[in-house]
Amino acid sequence: MSDEAFCIHGDLTPGNIIRAGGKDYWIDLGDVTYGDPDIDMGYLMFVADHIPTKLVDFLYHISRKQFQEFAEIYGQEYYGSRWRSPELEAKLHDVLLIKAGNSILKRPASGIIYRPLINGHTLSYSIRRSLMSLFVRKL
């Protein structure tokens, strides 16, 4: 990734954007930094497509479908015609791998969950989500 002089949130989720009085407010600013803005979108796609459904419900208090709809709207608005282009998809996938690697460093046991993703699409998304959901049934 190239060095960028953009402000990025670092934990961009629907719950961290509040609209009041016609203005948007960003909250939970503990991970705000400078860098490539695709990091925020990569994080959104990571949660939307790879976090177990029960964990999405528990952490974000919305359904996976709602989270995916938010990510889709955000992506369309932010990227315009570049959204869903092969070049952007490839870059966001690389960001997603960085996020998975970071999760493994923080919680080594999570490597079991992310191994199929890191090995390069060896399982379909639905199968991966099902396998990952097995690890969070107690939520």
Image (cartoon, rainbow, N blue to C red):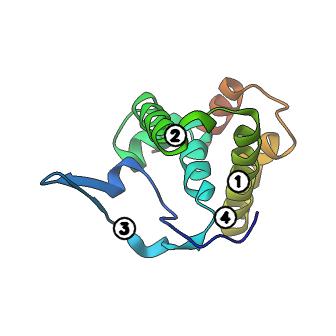
SS state under label 2: helix
- In which image quadrant can residue 98 be found? bottom right
C-alpha distance separating marks 4 and 3? 22 Å
- Crowding near pointer 1: few (<14 within 10 Å), some, many (20+)? many
Of residues 65 and 41, the one nearer the viewer is 41
Identify the mark nearer the N-term, 4 or 2.
2
Image position, residue 30 (x, y; %): 44, 75
Which residue is tagged 1?
95
Which mark sits nearer the N-terminus, 1 or 4? 1
Q: Amino acid at mark 4?
A: Arg
Q: Which mark is residue 75?
A: 2
Give the residue at mark 4. Answer: 107
**Alpha carbon distance from label 3 to label 2:** 21 Å
| Image depth: mark 2 or mark 1 in front | 2
Q: On residue 28, which mark appears?
A: 3
Q: Secondary structure at mark 3?
A: loop
